[in-house]
Amino acid sequence: MSILLEVTGLTRRFGGITAVDDVSFTVGEGSACAVIGPNGAGKTTLLDLVTGFTTPDEGTVRLDGQDVTGLAPHRLPAKGLLRTFQSARLVPLLSVRDNVMLGAHRFTRAGFLSDGLRLPRTRREERALRARADALLDFLGLHPFAERPAAELPAGAQRLVEVARGLAGGPRILLLDEPAAGLDDTETAELADALRAVHAEGIALVLIEHNMDLVAGVSERILVLDAGRVLADGPPDAVRNDPAVIEAYLGAAA
Ligand SMILES: Nc1ncnc2c1ncn2[C@@H]1O[C@H](COP(=O)(O)OP(=O)(O)OP(=O)(O)O)[C@@H](O)[C@H]1O
Ligand SMILES: [Mg+2]
């Protein structure tokens, strides 16, 4: 399996805190990897570093062999790297379909002038985006909600809309920050099904998650962070039984 994402020696300090401390890992093309760790372990900061939302003090991020360290976040979707956020960032009053179409915006070539004038090219592009959005809504079982304002959906469905919006950008790798936060068991199971389906399409996943059932059900590999450092990295069973991991979690719970 060829390496799609390669992170080497990533470090980010905030004042006296080293939020991410010399972290290295790789994600293979089409593979699914989870990042777990206690609160404050540095998971979101790591994802922010990989997706350009935070600049590292040290280290590099390579996508498909190309150095993308410090590249602005809006440059990365065109390279196939997309993310979702720890708190949902849907546009509440826009319909579910329109929210998903926003995720596909990079595929439009018409400028704002032709948008404003509604030239034929704009209308053609809009139809294509709409068809693409509808196909994704079907794929994730969201089609019944297509016309509804995003804010009216239950939490689980909103999470799926976020996934759909990420997929609309045509990712080769999708990074998700705690997508099951606030979901009940049924919603979490639906999300797991959706993520497995995404993975089956050959899209690589990096899943930040506390819910171990979701992690084990979706990922082939788990990276454990603790106080910014890599504590363990391996297949789910090995990581779950790793004494250092058990200790970090018990320590966090105590
Ligand atoms: N912008 C910031 N300024 C200062 N400190 C920060 C900033 N972002 C994160 N930190 C600190 O860095 C550490 C790692 O935070 P981070 O949000 O990455 O953890 P996390 O593993 O995502 O936690 P959680 O599970 O609670 O989401 C924490 O100590 C946090 O307080
Ligand atoms: Mg976080």
Image (spheres, helix red, strand yellow):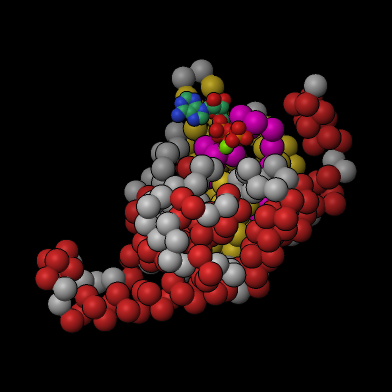
At 20% from the left and 71% from the top, the residue drawn is: 110
At 34% from the left and 54% from the top, the residue drawn is: 74
Q: Position of residue 86 (x, y in %)?
A: 54, 43
Q: Position of residue 177 (x, y in %)?
A: 57, 46
Q: Position of residue 212 (x, y in %)?
A: 76, 47
Image vertical order of residue 182 relative to residue 187, above or below: above
Looking at this view, is 222 or 160 the one in front?
160
Q: Name the quarter where the C terminus is drawn.
A: top right
Would residue 164 be counted in the magenta stretch? no
Would residue 43 be counted in the magenta stretch? yes
Looking at this view, is 86 or 97 the one in front?
97
Figure quarter occupied by ligand 1: top right
Q: Position of residue 60 (x, y in %)?
A: 48, 46
Q: From this viewpoint, is residue 25 visible?
A: no
Image vertical order of residue 33 relative to residue 123, above or below: above
Question: In the visual, does 147 lie left or right of 4?
Answer: left
Looking at this view, is 219 or 60 the one in front?
219
Q: Name the quarter where the N terminus is drawn.
A: bottom right
At 33% from the left and 71% from the top, the residue drawn is: 107
Locate residue 77: give its quadrant.
Answer: bottom left
Q: From this viewpoint, is residue 207 visible?
A: yes
Furthest toward the top, the residue is 16
Q: Which residues are magenta?
A: 33-47
At 64% from the left and 63% from the top, the residue drawn is: 195
Image vertical order of residue 179 relative to residue 254, above or below: below
